[in-house]
């Protein structure tokens, strides 16, 4: 090996070592606000959620509530099809007008959304209108916000808030509906009202 080749190898080894040190320092300085940190954090959260849901299932005396948590566990483990099947069956087996019926339907809509089935998600929320007019409109509004249709979301939120003023149908979700209504407010209307 010639001196020139040896010198070239030393420079390459040194630059590789410095590169690894730079990566390590960058990871350390930006931890946990980096991709690796987010992955580790998400994984720990998922493991904690799975553990908590498993314990909840084991301790739950009500078979319907246990089925709800089993569907949540399936979703947490990434089995969206299993979660959808479980939530559909639970929604169909619970009495309309009950809190468990509402929760199972809302989570079913969310599972459809995560499973890239937007038509089914929206239909699930719309089907709640007879029994739960406030939550139905609120969930539809959040759907339309995610779809980028602020006008439709605003109209649904206005309807939900007007109905809530008459009958309290939003319950504890009234503040959330008001917050969303502020988000979908047209920017030009706010600017126009300031010019007067």
Image (spheres, rainbow, N blue to C red):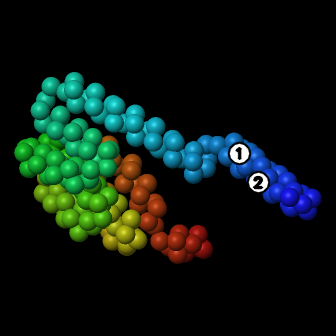
Q: Are marks 1 and 2 in contact (CB under 8 Å)?
A: no
For the point 11% across and 49% down, the residue is: 89
Q: Is residue 103 above or below residue 1?
A: above
Label 1 SS: helix
Q: Residues within 10 Å of mark 1 (few under 14, many from 20)?
A: few
- Indicate the quadrant containing the N terminus: top left, top right, bottom left or bottom right: bottom right
Locate residue 139: give its quadrant. Answer: bottom left
The dot on residue 152 is none
Front residue of 98 and 163 = 98
The mark lying in front, picked from 1 and 2, is: 2
Residue shown at 52% from the left, 71% from the top: 187
Q: Is residue 32 left or right of residue 169?
A: right
Kindly indicate the quadrant of the structure image that contains residue 12.
bottom right
Tag of residue 16: 2
Most distant residue in the front direction = 1
User: How far across and how far down the image is residue 115, in percent?
Assistant: 29, 60
Question: Can residue 53 be seen here?
Answer: yes
The residue closer to the viewer here, 124 or 138, is: 124
Which element type, helix, strand or loop, lies under badge 2?
Answer: helix
Left or right of 6 in this view: 80: left
Vertical position of residue 184 compared to residue 11: above or below: below
Q: Is residue 60 left or right of residue 39?
A: left
Residue at figure coordinates x 16%, y 52% from the top left: 85
Query: Between 92 and 189, which is closer to the camera in this rendering?
Result: 92
**Figure quadrant of the C terminus:** bottom right
Please give the residue where the numbered disc 1 appears in the rendered image.
24
Q: From this viewpoint, is residue 135 visible?
A: no
Q: Is residue 112 above or below residue 34?
A: below
Measuring from the top left, give residue 68's x and y in whole percent.
Answer: 20, 40
């Amino acid at each position: 090996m010639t001196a020139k080749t040896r010198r070239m190898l030393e420079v390459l080894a040194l630059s590789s070592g410095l590169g690894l040190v730079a990566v390590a320092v960058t990871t350390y300085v930006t931890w946990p606000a980096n991709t690796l940190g987010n992955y580790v954090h998400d994984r720990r959260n998922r493991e904690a959620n799975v553990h908590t849901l498993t314990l909840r299932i084991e301790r739950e005396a009500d078979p319907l509530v246990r089925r709800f948590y089993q569907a949540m566990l399936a979703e947490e483990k990434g089995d969206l099809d299993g979660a959808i099947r479980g939530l559909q069956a639970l929604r169909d087996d619970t009495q309309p007008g009950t809190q468990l019926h509402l929760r199972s339907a809302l989570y079913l809509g969310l599972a459809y959304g995560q499973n890239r089935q937007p038509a089914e998600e929206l239909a699930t929320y719309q089907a709640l209108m007879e029994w739960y007019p406030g939550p139905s409109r609120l969930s539809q509004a959040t759907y339309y916000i995610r779809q980028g249709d602020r006008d439709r979301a605003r109209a649904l939120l206005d309807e939900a808030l007007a109905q809530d003023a008459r009958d309290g149908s939003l319950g504890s979700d009234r503040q959330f509906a008001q917050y969303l209504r502020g988000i979908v407010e047209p920017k030009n209307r706010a600017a126009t009202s300031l010019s007067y």
